[in-house]
Image (cartoon, rainbow, N blue to C red):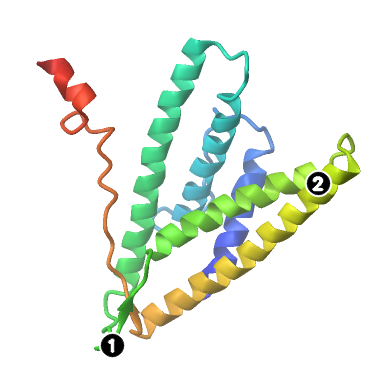
Amino acid sequence: MKIAETANRIFRESIEKYHETDNVDQPIDNPYPSGSLEHLLYLKNWIDTVQWHLEDIIREPDIDPVKALEIKRRIDRSNQERTDTVEYIDSWFLEHFKDVQPRPDARINTESPAWALDRLSILALKIYHMDIERRRHDISDAKRREVEEKYRILREQQKDLSTAIDELLDEIARGKKYMKVYRQMKMYNDPELNPVLYKKRK
C-alpha cells in the first residue's frame, strides 16, 4: 500500500485550505466521502492545523489570562479529538486488514499505522511553516542558513517516515507484521478518573 503519498497530498491540501483565511474558528469543509480513509486523514490534519495556530496564539506575551485559559481548554478538547481521530484511522486499518492471516513469525510494530501518520501530519505542518520562514526577507543570513538546514532535515524526515509507513503497511498486508492497537485511555477528560474533577463532587 502506498498510503504515505496520498496522506502527504491530503495533509498539504488541508493546510493550504486552512491558510486561505488563517482563522482558527473557520469550519472544516472536508471534500472526501465520510467513512473513507481520505476523509479521516483530512480531518486529522485539520485538527492538527487549527491546534498549531492555537498554540501560537496562547504564547502571545500580553494575552489576557481569561482568554488564555479559554484557549488552553480548547487545546485540551483538540487533543482529545486528535486522539479519537487517530483511533478511527487505526480502526479503518484494522477493518482493511481483517482477512490477513499473520504468519507464525509475524512481529508487532512499536506504533500503529495511524500514530505514524499522526507524526507525518505534524511534519507536514512543520515543513509548511518552515518554508514560510525561509522565504522571509527580514532575517539575517545566519538565521536563514539555520532555517534552510532545518527545512532540509524536515523534508528528509518526511521522506524517511513516508517510506517507513508504506513498508509497515506492506508488511501487515503480507502477514509479516500484525496490528495490535492500544487505546490511549486518557484520564484527564474523564470526570470519573480525574481526581480534581471527581473530588469536587464530594
Q: Can residue 112 be seen in this view?
A: yes
Q: Nearer the viewer, residue 34 or 116?
A: 116
Residue 105: image tag: 1
Residue 134: image tag: 2
**Residue at 75% in and 49% down:** 131
Give the x, y percent position of residue 133: 77, 42
The quarter holding residue 186 reads top left
**Residue placed farthest to the front in the image?**
142
Left or right for 120, reference 105 = right
**Quadrant of the drawing holding the C terminus:** top left
> Is residue 195 placed above or below 140 in the rendered structure?
above
**Residue at 46% in and 61% down:** 116
> Is residue 74 placed above or below 110 in the rendered structure?
above
Q: Can residue 135 be seen in this view?
A: no
> Is residue 180 placed above or below 81 in the rendered structure?
below
**Residue at 43% in and 27% down:** 74
Residue 10: image tag: none
What distance separates the C-alpha of mark 2 from that of mark 1? 47 Å
> Is residue 27 placed above or below 61 in the rendered structure?
below
Give the x, y percent position of residue 140: 88, 39
**Residue at 29% in and 49% down:** 184
Q: Which of 159 and 11 is in front in this view?
A: 159
Give the x, y percent position of residue 57: 59, 25
Element type at mark 1: loop
Three-letter code, disc 2: Arg
Which is more N-terminal, label 1 or label 2? Answer: 1
Left or right for 84, reference 51 = left
